[in-house]
Amino acid sequence: MHLHLFVIGLVGVFTWGRMLGMLVGVIFGMLMSTVPGLSAALAISLALPFVFSMDPATGLIILGSIWGGAIYGASKAAILINTPGNPSAMTTTFDGYPMTKKGKAAEALFGALIASASGGMISAAVLLLLFGPLSHIALKFGSAQFFWLAIFGMTTISSMSSSGLSKGLLGVCTGVLLSFVGLNIMTGSPQYTFGLEPLTKGITLIAGILGFFSFSQMMGLMSSEDAFIAEYKERKGYLLTVFRQYTKKIGIVVRSALIGTGVGMLPGAGSPIATMVAYNESKRWAKPTERYGTGIIEGVFTSEAAANATVGGSLIPLMSLGIPGDADAAVIAGGLLAFGLIPGPKMIQQSGVVAYTFIASLFVANLVMLVTGFFLMRITGRILLIPRRYIMPTVIALAMLGTYSLNDSMLDVGVLLACGIIAYTFRRVGIHPGTLALGLILGPIANEGFTQTLLQARASHSMIGAFLGSWVSIILIVLIIAGVVSGFLIERRPGATSTRSSDKRVTESV
């Protein structure tokens, strides 16, 4: 760590132009990601043409502010209407929307805000202090390690199955099967495309996620007789109540943020995997009285802290090695190159002041997001005061528009509708749509990792060496075994039966 460069960068952040740009970036990111299908990467991409004329530090500050604001903004729709703005907010729906159904939407929104800001600042601190050593760990992940990482991610099924592991497994397997649609990575020939050439590109993740959550949720609301989705109340003293819960559960926030940072720095892993792993760990170590998935604030803390922590995590390999951690970081990498900055080992030597100004801005941007988000939170919560008959067509239209804008393809809209019908059917039998999304996200990672490792094993004539020849693989296998065992223990511990019953009622109610 170059302390003097960080101090220079921190002082350089506090200029009127950069602070105004940061404020505009945070608000733009939050508003963009509130609309289902408009991801953080899209928000950053739209801003690129406007920041090219600025100096590199100011441009990067604005892009980073948009990124953090977009990750947090996705939680609003997840909490209020059970529709994640982007995949990173998927686990926020597990407890956020049940809290809304209980009349605690204001508490959930405020909890998401402070946890998201905390996660962002913790990951920025890790980026500042340890991005050099930690970047080398990311290089230890090859095809075998990503295969085991995907399998480990699938053990989080115990965190989202409300009717037992068997139904959860059915949901995950269905999602994995959907992820196989496209081209066979071994032969290059189409598979499961039913003769439709556009499907050779595979099922777009955003289309699938919006179908599983957004469209299926609106289908469920069609059968409801209530005039409103839920009641919005700002209980007296709710801010102090949530803050007290936050201080009591600060360990959960820190642990989730560290998990989000760690997973975020793995190229290709991304925030959906980070939030699922963090949520699973929180549920694994929870007390029997903490019933995750039924509407507790700890679940919102976990998801949002991990989601925003992936921002700093994915910047670790980018700024140290020139390897973007996810799609959002890849867009940031494009911005760096456009400014004439080369991300990688020589970035500190060649552009140290700009790099540390960018890192320092991440701390300030999260504070700006905390203040701005608080004032916008009450306006956003008023969505629940809109009659249900107006919200349903609006959400469906926005979901279709966001899906169509991905590739200008009506086939993606058809995929959204098909995934929505599948998820609605699964909801009716007590299978959470999160299990479908889990399989859709992790299926390609597991498939590619397994195939590449298998080819390496054939070349080296050692199956065991290819799959188990790394200490990282051994650690992941141990975590997989622990995840499976803990899943059965969670299923059988005292209070689990009543928890599943309440989970099922929540699932059926949506």
Image (cartoon, helix red, strand yellow):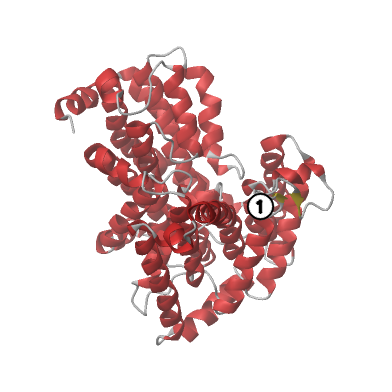
In the image shown, does 39 or 190 lie closer to the viewer? Answer: 190
Name the kind of residue labelled 1 in the image: Gly
Q: Position of residue 203 (x, y in %)?
A: 69, 49
Disc 1 target residue: 208
In the rendered image, the vertical position of residue 430 relative to residue 464, given as above or below = below
Q: Quick one: which residue is furthest to the front in this view?
A: 461
Q: Residue at x 48, y 37 (%)?
A: 328
Q: Residue at x 31, y 42 (%)?
A: 136
Q: From this viewpoint, is residue 233 visible?
A: no
Label 1's element?
A: helix
On the rendered image, what quadrant is the C terminus found in? bottom right
In the image shown, does 191 or 131 lie closer to the viewer? Answer: 191
In the rendered image, the vertical position of residue 290 relative to residue 182, given as above or below = below
Q: Position of residue 263 (x, y in %)?
A: 39, 51
Q: From this viewpoint, is residue 68 visible?
A: yes
Q: Position of residue 360 (x, y in %)?
A: 27, 31
Left or right: 182 as drawn, with respect to 466 = right
Q: Quick one: which residue is furthest to the top in this view?
A: 53
On the rendered image, what quadrant is the N terminus found in? top left
- Total count of labels: 1
Q: Quadrant of residue 127?
A: top left
Q: Quadrant of residue 506?
A: bottom right
In the rendered image, the vertical position of residue 477 relative to residue 269, given as above or below = below
In the rendered image, the vertical position of residue 195 relative to residue 300, given as above or below = above
Q: Residue at x 42, y 16 (%)?
A: 339
Q: Residue at x 45, y 83 (%)?
A: 496
Q: Quick one: which residue is furthest to the left in this view?
A: 4
How dense is the environment of label 1, judged by Cα within 10 Å: few (below 14), some, or many (20 and up)? many
Q: Position of residue 149 (x, y in %)?
A: 45, 58
